[in-house]
Amino acid sequence: MSQLLTAPPTDGDIDDVSPVVACRLPKPLHDQVKAACKAGGMSASRFIRETLQAAFDNDKVVIKPVPPVPAKMKELTRDMYRLFASVANNTNQLAKRVHYDHLNDRCSDKTYAAVAEQLAILNRVMVSRLPP
């Protein structure tokens, strides 16, 4: 079995960040991983995590095909681009402001966490609506 390496800690690490594990793969296996990721529409990291978890749980990994993209979402129209850009700009301003206020004790940890969670949800929704 190849040696697994974990990334060295950096000064900015927080407790809930998972460690990074790296390993080398033979070319045929790497090609299989890439093909499975493409078929399932997931990143290599997610595929490997799910595969390892399934192996430890004595379960099978199910690779579901990516759902088809509606025709109207296949291209980003000028209006959609403007909308995404303006929402992204406003979201960035909000994130900067709440971060600044949190650093200067103008908002509580609870408020900061709630805003961060909502921004993360908004980010996932926006990214999921972008064309491939």
Image (spheres, grey):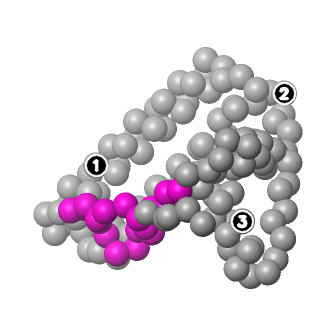
Q: Which mark is residue 51?
A: 3
Q: Which mark is residue 71?
A: 2
Residue 57, how many percent across, how many down? Answer: 74, 82
Residue 129, how many percent across, how many down? Answer: 67, 40
Front tag of 1 and 3 = 3
Residue 15 inside the magenta-drawn segment: yes
Q: Along the horizontal axis of the image, is 1 left or right of 118?
A: right
Element on which disc 2 rests: helix
Mark 1 or 3, nearer chain start: 3
| Along the line of sight, the residue nearer the viewer: 4 or 123 | 4
Up the image or down, 127 lies above or below 58; here it is above
Q: Residue at x 80, y 27 (%)?
A: 72
Residue 127 inside the magenta-drawn segment: no
Q: Residue at x 31, y 70 (%)?
A: 14
Residue 25, how many percent across, how many down? Answer: 62, 50
Q: Which residues are magenta?
A: 6-23
Front tag of 3 and 2 = 3
Q: Residue at x 86, y 39 (%)?
A: 68
Q: Residue furthest front?
A: 1
Mark 1 or 2, nearer chain start: 2
Q: Main secondary structure of the magenta part?
A: loop
Q: Marks 1/3: CA distance?
A: 37 Å
